[in-house]
Image: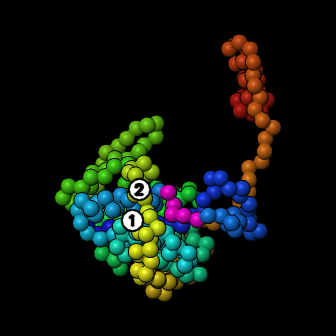
Amino acid sequence: MDIIVCIKRVPETAEADLVIDKGRRGIDTDGLVFSINEWDNYAVEAAIQLKEAQGGTITVISVGPEENNEVLRRALAMGADEAIRLTDPAFEGSDATAMAKVLAAAIRGIPYDLILTGVQADDDGFGAVGVALAQLLGLPYAALVTDISLEGGTLTVHRELEGGLEEVDRVKLPALLTIQTGINEPRYVSIMGIRRVAKKEIAVKGASDLGLSGGEVGIEGSMSQIEELFFPPVGEGAEIIEGTVDEEADVLVKILKERGGIA
């Protein structure tokens, strides 16, 4: 089985004091630590487990600057076979659909049976690249996948739904899956493992190599763009309503009427 995994390098922001950059369309990343997107890490592990069970190859692809080699080499150290970095100024400002165009153009030249992406990215949380990529490639897909098994040319996948529900689907290969966290336990990558793949070639391709024009990707090729990024205003805090249940209900109804919540 030949598998392609799309991965992203993102800043770790959970414990950082974020600062909006001067353009007010992103955050200031100076001083932030970058790593592989959490969802993508689970996708790489899922690919490796399938390879160990079925044989085949794994190709990891990332869109971004030379610094993305860090996450690509991490995936190689985990067990991927080949790595491709897609780099071009024309890709800058791409939204989810334009980014899917970039990935689709690269993937069309690679043999594959299965494509894996993370459900979403830590930095923007859109969760749209994987399903947009499936649409562009004309592939059947399943999103929010929490379990995978293969029999013949058909995948049986479990999907996470709202309210704690789960759905089981069968998807014929070739296909695309977006992988949810918790599907597995990503393996530890040692420094020695990374050193072993330090000299492995990472193929680099730009827009012209992929047959893409500037108008197809980047801001011009995007269906949406960020106008402004800002922190939510700080409110005055919660109002605690005290009294009996009936008294609390009366006060709540009064507040809702005053603020236009109900007529």
Distance of label 2 from label 1 (alpha carbons): 9 Å
* Mark positioned earlier in the residue sequence (2 or 1): 1
Q: Quadrant of the C terminus?
A: top right
Find the magenta span and give its range: 34-38
Q: Residue furthest front?
A: 192
For the residues labelled 2 and 1, say whether their Cβ atoms are less than 8 Å apart. Answer: yes
**Residue at 73% across, 62% down:** 20
**Residue at 68% across, 14% down:** 245
- The tag on residue 186 is 2
Q: Nearer the viewer, residue 228 or 205?
A: 205
**Residue at 46% across, 60% down:** 40
At mark 1, the secondary structure is helix
Does the magenta run of residues contain 187?
A: no
Where residue 190 appears, as percent x and y from the top left, is: 44, 64
Q: Which residue is mark 1?
A: 78
Q: Nearer the viewer, residue 255 or 183?
A: 183
| Three-letter code for the amino acid on which mark 1 is drawn | Met
The answer to whether residue 37 is seen in the rendering is yes
Q: Nearer the viewer, residue 215 or 84?
A: 84
